[in-house]
Image (cartoon, rainbow, N blue to C red):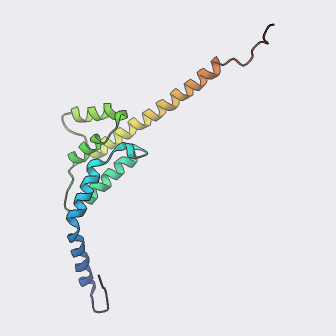
Amino acid sequence: MRIDDENTSAVAWARLKADFHDNKNSRALYLQRQFTNIRLDDFSSVSAYCQQLKALADQLTNVGDKVTEDRMVLQLIAGLNDNYDTVGTYFIQVDKLPSFYDARSKLILEENRKQKQTAHNSSALDTALLITTPTNRPPPTP
């Protein structure tokens, strides 16, 4: 797009809008593919996973492909890994799906619980190793 002194901001805006709409379908297709294939395993935390899922849903809405709350929650569940099978199963077995933010909150609580459990188990294992490792051995007898 060429902008010169003769162009007004309205003309520039109209050109930008036209460019945006020309690419709308291809961007919608690309975003749809990303949204459908997003997986928790690709992220460092549940929070990061949910943040990206929400960002993709917002971008899809911006190109005219509105993502419903139920679709967001179903995709959130579909992208979970085996560590969250129990929570995901609970979500789909209730009569009404939770809101996206409620599901996100419950998943983050479960992630925190799992991290604390892992830390506790690791600490217990370290303690057990310290207790069972002999430190004062008597000298060997001839």
In the rendered structure, the answer to whether residue 54 lies left or right of residue 18 reads right
Q: Residue at x 43, y 33 (%)?
A: 113
Determine whether, in the image, residue 129 is placed left or right of residue 47. Answer: right
Say which quarter of the image contains residue 138: top right
Determine whether, in the image, residue 14 is placed left or right of residue 4: left
Residue 53 or 142: which is nearer the viewer? 142
**Residue occupying image coordinates x 22% and y 58%:** 29
Residue plotted at (26% across, 49% down): 36
Image location of residue 64, percent across then percent down: 19, 61
Of 102 and 93, nearer the camera is 93
Q: Does residue 62 appear in this view? A: no
Q: Which residue is outermost to the bottom?
A: 6
Residue 80 sits above or below residue 123 on the image? below
Q: Residue furthest top?
A: 142
**With respect to residue 58, does 11 lie above or below?**
below
Q: Residue furthest front?
A: 142
Foreground: 88 or 105?
A: 88
- Quadrant where the image shows the C terminus: top right
For residue 96, say whether it is visible: yes
